[in-house]
Image (cartoon, helix red, strand yellow):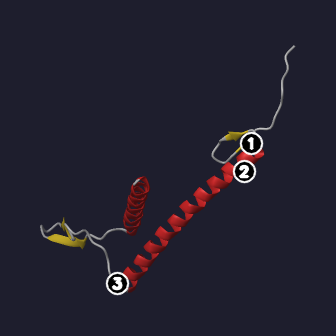
């Protein structure tokens, strides 16, 4: 005789499975905290970008490539037409975001080093 037992399996948003509702709720609340922290960090990065973009626009400033601020393009008469080699705003946002992530990793490494000592 084969005996089977049915029970409820609870899934969390990160696809983990739990037999206990309390364990599933605890895991889900931890995931929600992680999502909230990530969202807050992204909001902070976006605020920094928006502030910087606003200051640049207000003062009619721009950000240019240091090594090549002007780029020459040949024309039909053999002369060159020059264009300012400005950095696009999406590249500015990506640079701010990557630098913020790098700084966060450095802070975490310092905290880990301090707790180990």
Circle number at residue 63: none
Which residue does the numbered mark 2 point to in the structure image? Answer: 25
Numbered tag placed on residue 10 in the rendering: 1
Outermost residue, left side: 78
Q: Position of residue 76 (x, y in %)?
A: 17, 66
Residue 102 to residue 54: above or below: above
Report if the CB atoms under discs 2 and 3 are less than 8 Å apart.
no
Q: Quadrant of residue 97?
A: bottom left
Looking at the rendered structure, the secondary structure element under dot 1 is strand
Of the 4 image quadrants, the one containing the C terminus is bottom left
Q: Is residue 68 left or right of residue 3?
A: left
Q: Nearer the viewer, residue 29 or 86?
A: 29
Q: State the residue lying farthest toward the top.
A: 1
Find the distance from the CA under tag 1 to the CA under tag 3.
56 Å
Label 3 belongs to which residue? 60
Distance from the alpha carbon under mark 2 to that under mark 3 = 52 Å
Residue ID at (71%, 46%):
24
Point out the tag, 2 or 1, that comes first from the N-terminus.
1
Label 3 Cα crowd, 10 Å radius (few <14 / some 14-19 / many 20+): few
């Amino acid at each position: 005789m084969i005996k089977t037992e049915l029970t409820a399996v609870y899934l969390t948003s990160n696809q983990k499975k739990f037999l206990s509702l309390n364990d599933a709720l605890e895991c889900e609340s931890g995931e929600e905290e992680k999502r909230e922290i990530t969202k807050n960090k992204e909001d902070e990065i976006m605020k920094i970008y928006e502030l910087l973009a606003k200051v640049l626009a207000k003062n009619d400033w721009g950000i240019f490539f240091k090594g090549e601020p002007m780029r020459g393009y040949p024309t039909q008469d053999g002369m060159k037409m020059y264009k300012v080699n400005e950095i696009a705003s999406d590249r500015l946002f990506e640079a701010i975001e990557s630098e913020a992530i790098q700084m966060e990793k450095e802070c975490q490494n310092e905290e880990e080093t301090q707790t180990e000592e």
